[in-house]
Image (cartoon, rainbow, N blue to C red):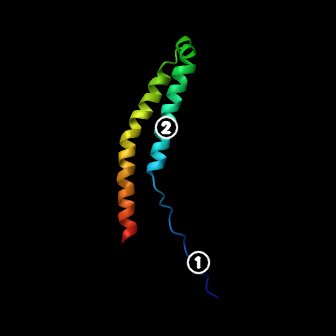
């Protein structure tokens, strides 16, 4: 009796723009929460760089969003074939 392999499932290819938007939103919310509620604590303990980290994550999200928009456009083209 030959040893037959079951067929492999198709790889996942979800739309990526929602993930990029979620990342942007997460960095924005984290930065705003720190700025509004923890600004004094951050200053007292020398952690102001946490705000800059949130800003950098938010700003780096825009090039990521552009890449994911291109990925999704190519994904639609691949699926149309």
Quarter of the image that includes the C terminus: bottom left
In 3D space, how far apart are the residues under numbered discs 1 and 2 (Cα atoms)?
A: 43 Å
In this view, 37 is above or below 58:
above
Please report whichever mark, 1 or 2, sits nearer to the chain's N-terminal start.
1
Residue at the disc numbered 2:
25
Q: Is residue 61 left or right of residue 2?
A: left
Q: Mark 1 or mark 2: which is in front?
A: 2
In this view, 44 is above or below 64:
above
Residue 20 percent location from the top left of the image: 45, 45
In this view, 37 is above or below 54:
above
| Residue that extends furthest to the bottom in the rendered view of this protein | 1
- The one of 17 and 11 positioned closer to us in this rendering: 17
Residue at the disc numbered 1:
5
In this view, 2 is above or below 24:
below
Residue 58 percent location from the top left of the image: 43, 34
Q: Is residue 6 left or right of residue 23?
A: right
């Amino acid at each position: 009796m030959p040893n037959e392999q079951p067929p492999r499932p198709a790889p996942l290819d979800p739309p990526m723009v929602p993930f990029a938007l979620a990342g942007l939103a997460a960095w924005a919310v984290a930065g705003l929460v720190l700025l509004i509620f923890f600004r004094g604590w951050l200053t007292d303990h020398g952690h102001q760089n946490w705000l800059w980290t949130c800003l950098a994550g938010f700003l780096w999200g825009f090039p990521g969003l552009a890449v994911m928009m291109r990925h999704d456009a190519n994904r639609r083209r691949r699926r149309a074939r």
